[in-house]
Image (spheres, grey):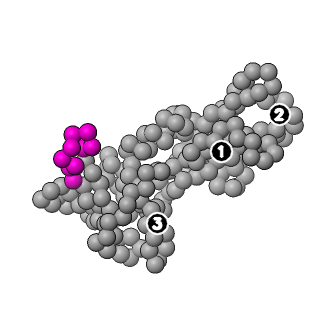
Amino acid sequence: MSKESEQASGDLVAIWDVPLNDGVHRIEFEHGTASGKRIVRVDGKEIIHRDWMFKLVGDEIFNIGNAKCVLKVMPAGAFSFSYELCVNDKSYQKFTEIQRKTKKTWLVELESGSFRVILEKSTLDVWANGENLECTHEFVEDGSETLFYLGGRPACIKTVTSGKRKEGIVHILFVDGNIIEENNSV
């Protein structure tokens, strides 16, 4: 969720939560307009630190895994600025919208740990905490099943039609035969 232009503390001006296959990454941007300072943090780790920049607008380019990010600093009037994040050449809003449409996400708690499971709908690849899982795909009477193991436990994503034209295809995750509710926050 974007909290652009949020003055949380000091020079912190923008925060974005970016959903990728290996998890949701928090990007924080500090922009000291008096000092010329720019700091970019990903998941609390400083990846860019610039002091005494005389040009207060411009781009910062960095990667999170395979995702290319461009943080744009633009003038927004006298001594004010706007901040925009682009991920893989798409605006933050468009990128997160595409992620919601092309992926299904579940958060699973097991004795062996917590898992963020992602189904890429176009390829039927399944990811758990950033690892592409080995899967078996089978056609069944009412749709298809994607079978895999999660934390040593049998898991299955069942793909069926909803029977409703607007809803279309539904993906349901089962772990040990129990339905896991989808996480709509991506």
Question: Could you tell me residue 145's position as x and y percent?
Answer: 23, 60
Q: Which element carries disc 1, helix, strand or loop?
A: strand
Judging by the rendered image, the residue that carries numbered circle 3 is 115
Name of the residue lying farthest toward the bottom = 111
Image quarter where the N terminus lies is top right
Disc 1 vs disc 2: Cβ atoms closer than 8 Å?
no
Which residue bears the numbered disc 1?
15
Magenta region, residue range: 160-168
The disc, 1 or 3, on the residue closer to the chain's N-terminal end is 1
Asked whether the residues under the numbered discs 3 and 2 touch, taking CB atoms below 8 Å apart as contact, a structural biologist would say no
On screen, residue 48 versus residue 130, left or right, reads right
Q: CA distance from mark 1 to mark 2?
A: 17 Å
Identify the amino acid type marked 3: Phe
The percent position of residue 44, horizontal first and vertical second, equals 69, 55
The residue nearer to you, when weighing 180 against 126, is 180
Residue at the location (43% across, 66% down)?
A: 108
| Residue that mark 2 sits on | 33
